Image: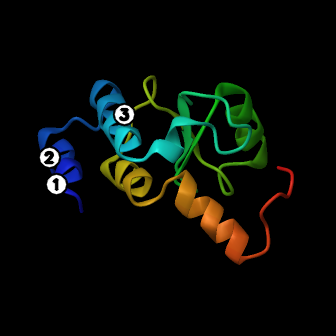
Amino acid sequence: HDDLAIMVMASGLSGMNGAGTFLEAVRARRREDDTCIDCGSPNPQWASVSNGVFVCLACSGRHRGLGVHVSFVRSLFMDAWKPEELSAMELGGNQKFRQLLEECSLAGLQL
């Protein structure tokens, strides 16, 4: 785990207020997370925890429609986050997910 994740988990910041701060810090370190992975909209405020990616409001609705077994969606600022969900976001990221899609010949497919 990154030092930031350990600090957040230990301080109990994984609730509604601290999660947004933590996730903003994660995004600040990874420029590719500043846009929605699906449509490219700037400053996504939602995340697919199960995929470790950041999405915009419109695309979060599509992800919700897939079901939680495919894409578990959380608001960066309005939802409570568990420490393991924050870790998933820290370990994931839009770039890593795109790379996985390319390696599996799934890049460019519509959601």
Label 2 or label 1, whichever lies nearer to me, is 1
Q: Is residue 35 above or below residue 58?
A: below
Percent coordinates x, y for residue 11 in the rendering: 13, 39
Q: Is residue 50 visible?
A: no
Percent coordinates x, y for residue 26 in the rendering: 35, 44
- Type of amino acid at the residue the image marks with label 1: Asp
Name the residue rendered at 42%, 47% in the picture: 30
Most foreground residue, 107 or 111: 107
Percent coordinates x, y for residue 62 in the rendering: 77, 38
Q: Answer with the quarter of the image where residue 84 lies.
A: bottom left
Residue under pointer 3: 24
Label 3 to label 2, Cα distance in Å?
15 Å
In-image side of 88 versus 8 (left or right): right
- Type of amino acid at the residue the image marks with label 3: Glu
Residue under pointer 2: 7
Label 2 to label 1, Cα distance in Å?
6 Å
Q: Is residue 19 visible?
A: yes
